[in-house]
């Protein structure tokens, strides 16, 4: 029997209204304060997120996410450091 295949990508490339699980975060790619803020907002490996909205006018910044029952906004540059996997 074949194992289910999962698709890995970064959070900034996730489609709207798509749910995914955070597989890893490159904490070294951001400042200590920015990393602490994301951790305080509940972002860490194993957390399920859903991309809800993105900014206007072609910049697509910030990105609104659903984390648990909260809606948070993060910068596109931070979302690019977060690897996610789609459910099979």
Image (spheres, helix red, strand yellow):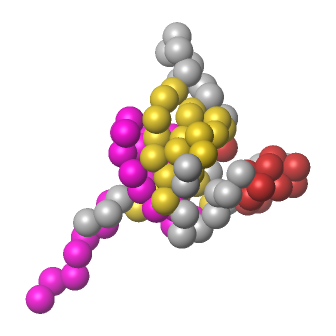
* Residue at position x 63%, y 40% in the image: 72
Q: Is residue 52 magenta?
A: no
* Residue at position x 23%, y 75% in the image: 4
The N terminus sits in image quarter: bottom left
| Residue 14 percent coordinates (x, y) | 41, 43
Q: Magenta stretch?
A: 1-24
| Residue 8 percent coordinates (x, y) | 39, 60
| Residue 62 percent coordinates (x, y) | 62, 28
* Residue at position x 53%, y 15% in the image: 56
Count of all numbered marks drawn on residues in the image? 0
Q: Is residue 16 magenta?
A: yes
The C terminus sits in image quarter: bottom left
Residue extending furthest top? 57
| Residue 83 percent coordinates (x, y) | 52, 58
* In-front residue for pair 50/12: 50
Report whether 69 appears left or right of 29.
left
Residue extending furthest right? 33
Residue extending furthest front? 69
Residue extending furthest bottom? 1
Q: Is residue 75 visible to us here? A: yes
Q: Is residue 38 above or below residue 27?
A: above
* Residue at position x 80%, y 49% in the image: 37
Report whether 25 appears left or right of 16.
right
Q: Is residue 76 visible to us here? A: no
* In-front residue for pair 24/73: 73
């Amino acid at each position: 029997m074949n194992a289910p295949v999962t698709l890995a990508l970064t959070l900034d490339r996730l489609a709207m209204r798509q749910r995914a699980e955070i597989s890893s975060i490159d904490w070294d790619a951001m400042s200590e304060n920015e990393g602490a803020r994301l951790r305080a907002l509940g972002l860490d490996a194993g957390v399920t997120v859903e991309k809800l909205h993105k900014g206007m006018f072609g910049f697509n910044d910030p990105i609104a996410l659903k984390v648990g029952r909260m809606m948070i906004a993060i910068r596109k540059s931070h979302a690019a450091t977060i690897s996610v996997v789609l459910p099979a």
